[in-house]
């Protein structure tokens, strides 16, 4: 089909919507290493994981063989409230940059949670409800995951307890209030409500918190309260599985117009949106059917891919969760209080870590002020105020488009616009007032944390 026939927004019809999630692990030659029991350092069994997670989610977490897992009809019906999400041709940005590159973005912010997180939240809440549980506990960084989970739990009549990283709790009070609208209880982490929270506060007085801290608290509360399980918004295999809906829709929309991307870009914190966006494209790459340049973009202040160590580490600061083999900065690494709260996790998805380690994708890190420069440039021409997290992908997409301008290359770029930034105005205010800093940890700091990694044979 001729390029001038491609609309600004490409939508799928209802009957074109994916009916199954894609499990990229089925096509990986080197599977992600198993989660380890924090006490025995042996691979965790389904029974052990079932004490923390919902039974069906445990099965999905451990499934390395089935390429496709059917999406239950109830979840597909919920998806219809906000999916399919549009694949947008960034004609205005292309014109502003005067680039020969063609730029597309998959927009996941067209729901009340403001992000892609609802794709997994409804799935995890659904399985908790089916198991007859009373409620779930979780952590949240920027707040999108907590908002999404509170929406899903409200819809299904489940209790929802959220531990929100303290710096985000203070920076984003309105995000907190949206969670409360949907019935969730929201506690700043580290708190004085849990034993782990008290310990972290004692060891790090005045700490701004981290996702690792909040995870520890949420797990402690889930384990101590009958009828509750813990759910996680990123990192885990099951979450990347649910988020594959993003990439499946993206690929179907591109195929509809015979478009083949050269480069696929996603921001990377724990890995949920990046893993979801690239899933079917990575599958083709693993099977030798096609090739793509896949780029993960992370904050320079929390550079787990670009400066971390590929090793087993605790998933949480309190060291009560399973150990995962991943690119990590160390479980007690607490990043600077940057404004991309969803990208402040010390580690990276085991699936993505293995793919990166095997050379199937590359990673770059970018400074905070450069990210906000890109966010503002995008907002002024494309009409969407992007979240700080998503703006890392925007920064990389703009940089690549400008390189194409210099070389004359007509590259097709696809990136994930995972959410909106309407609750991030404190960050935009600091950017405009020149009060935003670009803290980057030193090699000495990172070496100190790396030296504390658990010794696993």
Image (cartoon, helix red, strand yellow):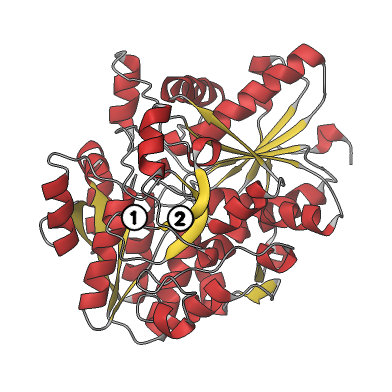
Quadrant containing the N terminus is top right
**Which residue is depicted at the point 34% across and 57% down?**
316
Relative to 428, is 46 above or below? Answer: below
Side of 43 relative to 280 (left or right): left
Q: Report, in whole angstroms, how far the alpha carbon at label 2 lies from the one at label 1.
A: 9 Å
- Which one is in front, 5 or 355? 355
Find residue 207 and name its label. Answer: none
Q: At 29% across and 33% down in the image, what residue appears?
A: 337
- Is residue 84 among the parts visible in the rendering? no
Vertically, is 86 above or below 322? Answer: above
Query: 174 left or right of 301?
Result: left
Looking at the image, can residue 285 be seen? yes
Q: Mark 2 touching mark 1, by CB under 8 A? A: yes
Look at the numbered disc 1 and give the secondary structure of its residue. Answer: helix
What residue is shown with label 2?
Answer: 117
Q: Which quadrant would residue 8 be assigned to in this image?
A: top right
Residue 273: percent from left, percent from top: 54, 50
Where is residue 171 shown, x and y percent of the image? Answer: 24, 36
Q: Which of marks 2 and 1 is nearer the N terminus?
A: 2
Residue 270 horizontal/vertical position (percent): 47, 50
In the depicted structure, whether residue 62 falls above or below residue 245: below
The residue singled out by tag 1 in the image is 147
Q: What element carries label 2?
A: loop
Q: How crowded is mark 1: few (under 14 residues within 10 Å), some or many (20 or more)?
A: many
Quick one: 270 or 386, which is closer to the camera?
Answer: 270
Q: Residue at x 61, y 75 (%)?
A: 63
Q: Please state if 418 lies on the left or on the right of 263 as rendered.
A: left
> Which x, y percent locates residue 83?
57, 58
**For the view shown, which residue lies furthest in the right direction?**
1
């Amino acid at each position: 089909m001729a390029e001038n026939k491609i609309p600004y927004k490409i939508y799928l019809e209802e009957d074109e919507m994916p009916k199954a999630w894609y499990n990229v692990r089925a096509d990986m030659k080197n599977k992600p290493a198993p989660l380890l029991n924090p006490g025995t350092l042996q691979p965790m069994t389904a029974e052990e994981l079932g004490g923390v997670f919902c039974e069906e989610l445990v099965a999905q977490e451990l499934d390395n063989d089935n390429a496709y897992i059917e999406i239950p009809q109830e979840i597909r019906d919920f998806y219809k409230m906000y999916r399919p999400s549009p694949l947008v041709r960034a004609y205005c940005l292309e014109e502003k940059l005067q680039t020969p590159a063609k730029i597309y973005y998959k927009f996941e912010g067209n729901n009340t949670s403001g992000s892609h997180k609802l794709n997994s939240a409804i799935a995890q809440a659904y399985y908790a409800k089916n198991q007859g549980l009373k409620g779930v506990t979780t952590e949240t960084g920027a707040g999108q995951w907590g908002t999404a989970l509170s929406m899903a739990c409200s819809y299904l009549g489940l209790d929802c307890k959220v531990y929100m990283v303290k710096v985000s709790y203070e920076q984003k009070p309105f995000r907190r209030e949206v969670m409360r609208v949907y019935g969730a209880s929201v506690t700043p982490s580290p708190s004085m409500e849990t034993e782990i929270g008290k310990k972290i506060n004692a060891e790090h007085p005045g700490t701004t918190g981290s996702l690792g801290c909040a995870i520890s608290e949420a797990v402690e509360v889930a384990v101590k309260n009958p009828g509750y399980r813990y759910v996680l918004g990123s990192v885990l295999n099951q979450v990347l599985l649910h988020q594959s809906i993003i990439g499946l829709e993206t690929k179907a929309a591109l195929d509809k117009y015979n478009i083949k991307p050269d480069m696929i870009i996603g921001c990377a914190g724990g890995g949920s949106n990046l893993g979801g966006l690239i899933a079917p494209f990575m599958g083709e790459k693993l099977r030798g059917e096609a090739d793509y340049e896949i780029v993960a973009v992370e904050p320079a202040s929390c550079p787990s891919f670009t400066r971390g160590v590929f090793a087993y580490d605790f998933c949480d600061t309190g060291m009560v969760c399973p150990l995962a083999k991943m690119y990590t900065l160390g479980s007690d690494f607490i990043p600077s209080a940057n404004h991309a709260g969803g990208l402040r996790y010390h580690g990276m998805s085991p699936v993505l870590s293995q793919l990166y380690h095997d050379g199937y994708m590359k990673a770059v890190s970018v400074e905070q002020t450069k990210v906000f420069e890109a966010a503002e440039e995008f907002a002024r021409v494309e009409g969407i105020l992007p979240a700080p997290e998503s703006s890392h992908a925007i920064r990389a997409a703009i940089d690549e488009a400008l390189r194409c301008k210099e070389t004359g290359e007509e590259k097709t770029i696809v990136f994930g616009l995972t959410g909106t930034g309407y609750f991030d105005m404190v960050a935009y205010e600091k950017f405009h007032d020149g009060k935003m800093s670009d803290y980057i940890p030193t090699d000495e700091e990172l070496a100190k944390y790396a030296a504390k990694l658990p010794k696993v044979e």
